[in-house]
Image (tube, rainbow, N blue to C red):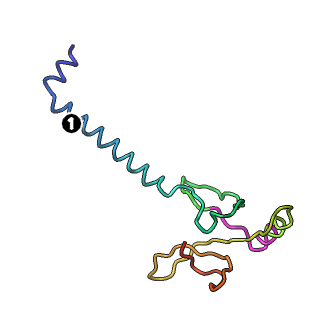
Amino acid sequence: MISLATARERWTSFLGSFVAVALGVAVVTMSALVLLSDGTGVPRRLAGAPVLVQSPAGEQTGGVFTENPPWAPERAEELRSELGRLPGVDTAVADRSFYAQAAGSEQRRGSGRATPGRPRYSPRTD
């Protein structure tokens, strides 16, 4: 009964607490939505591939999320040739992505794939 009487007498404080909790829930929900909106989906350029092989995860230090380090070019070529020899594999392609940013540009990724009309190790737009 005391709590009901307190809520009745101090309804503004009760309402303020309710609004604060509701806004806190909204902020956390929106933050989670923004963080998860990009997701871990497959890039458009790889969407048609039935199988993808990714390099082993790098070491996570201090709670910082880093990208997986790419394989060395020799190791990538070795894996590509091994996968290409498997039965049922039509084509195996090594794709080395790396961080690259031209001065004054928003582009932040590079790609090592050779594409007709584009030189090897060029900034990509996808």
Give the camera-side residue of 11 and 81: 81
| Numbered circles on residues, count | 1
Q: Quadrant of the N terminus?
A: top left
Q: Position of residue 120 (x, y in %)?
A: 66, 82
List the residue tagged with mark 1: 16
For the record, the magenta segment spans: 68-79
Compared with 97, 30 (above or below) is: above
Q: Position of residue 117 (x, y in %)?
A: 63, 86
Question: Could you classify mark 1 by the number of other residues whose Cα lies within 10 Å: few (under 14), some (14-19), or many (20 or more)?
Answer: few
Residue 65 lies in what quarter of the image?
A: bottom right
Three-letter amino acid code at the position of disc 1: Gly
| Residue positioned most to the left | 9
Residue drawn 46% across the image and 54% down it: 35
Q: Position of residue 90 (x, y in %)?
A: 80, 68
Q: As drawn, is 119 to the left or to the right of 78?
A: left
Residue drawn 70% across the image and 58% down it: 56
Residue drawn 66% across the image and 80% down it: 115
Q: Position of residue 57 (x, y in %)?
A: 67, 57
Q: Quadrant of the C terminus?
A: bottom right
Q: Is residue 2 magenta?
A: no
Residue drawn 64% across the image and 62% down it: 68
